[in-house]
Image: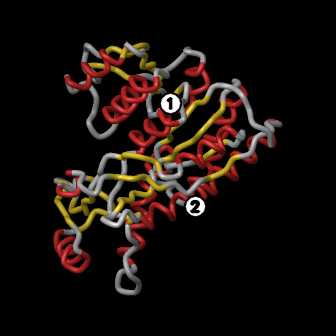
Amino acid sequence: MSAVNGKLAVVGIGGNALIRSQAHLSIQDQYVMVQELSEHLAGILEEGWNLLVVHGTGPQVGFILRRSELAINEVTPVPMDYAGADLQGGMGYMFVKALNNAFRRRKIGREPIAVLTLTLVDRDDPAFDRPSKPVGSVMTKENAADLASRCGWIVEEDVGRGWRRLVPSPKPRAIIEIESIRHLVEAGYVVIACGGGGIPVIRNAEGDLEGVEAVVDKDLTCSILARELKADLLILPTSVERVAVNFSTPEQRWLDLITVTEARAYCAQGQFAEGSMEPKVRALVEFVEQAGGIGVITSISCMTEALRGEAGTRVLPG
């Protein structure tokens, strides 16, 4: 396969996008969603763009950890970094298979490839002192206390629901396999990389890589990836076509175009939900500010229209 020319779009798809409903949680159900996503992704190629895909693992890592909890009296619990590696392999397989099939049907002469990807975090990141990311199943207080004692977990009550395990969410600093990814993109492959934000690793005192019990924000990793590859566009799909300010109030207003300066101001005002839309906007701001590309938030079904500027919220340089 020869190298291709054209603009590069990095697309970061959340793990929740593969869960149609609580009645459709199986791997087979998730693959159906990946098949639907792959048709939209193939449409991006047909618009003349090169493509790199990042997928989230939020719900899926919870499933792995739940299985581990249920089997804790039989086998050693799965460490977080190994759970991430497991999901990059399994979900990467789903995307490669579905994209191959979509490309064959549409007669697109491209080949997808999944890359096991490590994301470097700072071992002195303050997040390690303040675990804040809930993972795994909801537990009773007694069960949570037992697992905290046996496994050294940090647990906290999720008011109204139960108890959850908390892990750190350090900021991504670098992508270990960036040069391999760059080579594959330039050679014309459709790369699936940095699944779940990447497998979190640190460098120890000797300079060796070590996995850590943590979760890396996928959108922030997408921003680093897009900047390193000098992508022209970073798309972070969500459940709505555009971003709104004063959401769910009589003053709600949908945004078509915003500058980096306006986006920062809206974040400072608390216009975007901290656990969902806000990190997406901040990730786009970092990408646009440092790489000069265009950032887009839109729904999965509107991605092709967003490439043409016909849908979504576009974040532009100030």
Q: Is residue 245 above or below residue 60?
A: above
Q: What residue do we see at 48% from left, 54% from top?
A: 23
* Mark 2 vs mark 1, CA separation in Å: 23 Å
Q: Is residue 99 left or right of residue 254?
A: right
Q: Quadrant of the N terminus?
A: top right
Which residue is depicted at the point 29% across and 50% down? 170
Q: Nearer the viewer, residue 140 or 129?
A: 129
Q: State the image coordinates of residue 260 (x, y, percent, origin top left).
A: 35, 18
The way the protein has been coloured in the rendering is secondary structure
Identify which amino acid the numbered label 1 is placed on: Ile
Describe the element under mark 1 as helix, strand or loop. strand
Which label number is shown at residue 90? 2
Residue placed under numbered mark 1 in the picture: 235
**Helix, strand or loop under label 2:** helix
| Count of numbered circles on the image | 2
Residue sitting at x 42%, y 72%:
67
Residues at marks 2 and 1 touching, judged by CB atoms closer than 8 Å: no
Residue 294: mark: none
Residue at 57%, 61% (x, y): give it.
89
Location of residue 7 by image quarter: top right
Is 113 on the left-hand or right-hand side of 284? right
In the image: residue 216, left or right of residue 51: left
Question: In the figure, 230 relative to 82: above or below?
Answer: above
**Left or right relative to 125: residue 64:** right
- Residue 54 is situated, as x and y percent measured from the top left of the image, at 52, 44
Q: Of residues 46 and 238, which is closer to you in this image?
A: 46
As drawn, which residue projects farthest toward the bottom? Answer: 74
Which mark is first along the chain, 1 or 2? 2
Count neighbours of disc 1 (C-alpha within 10 A) and say few if under 14, some if 14 to 19, many if 20 or more. many
Residue 78: x and y, percent?
40, 73
Q: Position of residue 299 (x, y in %)?
A: 50, 30
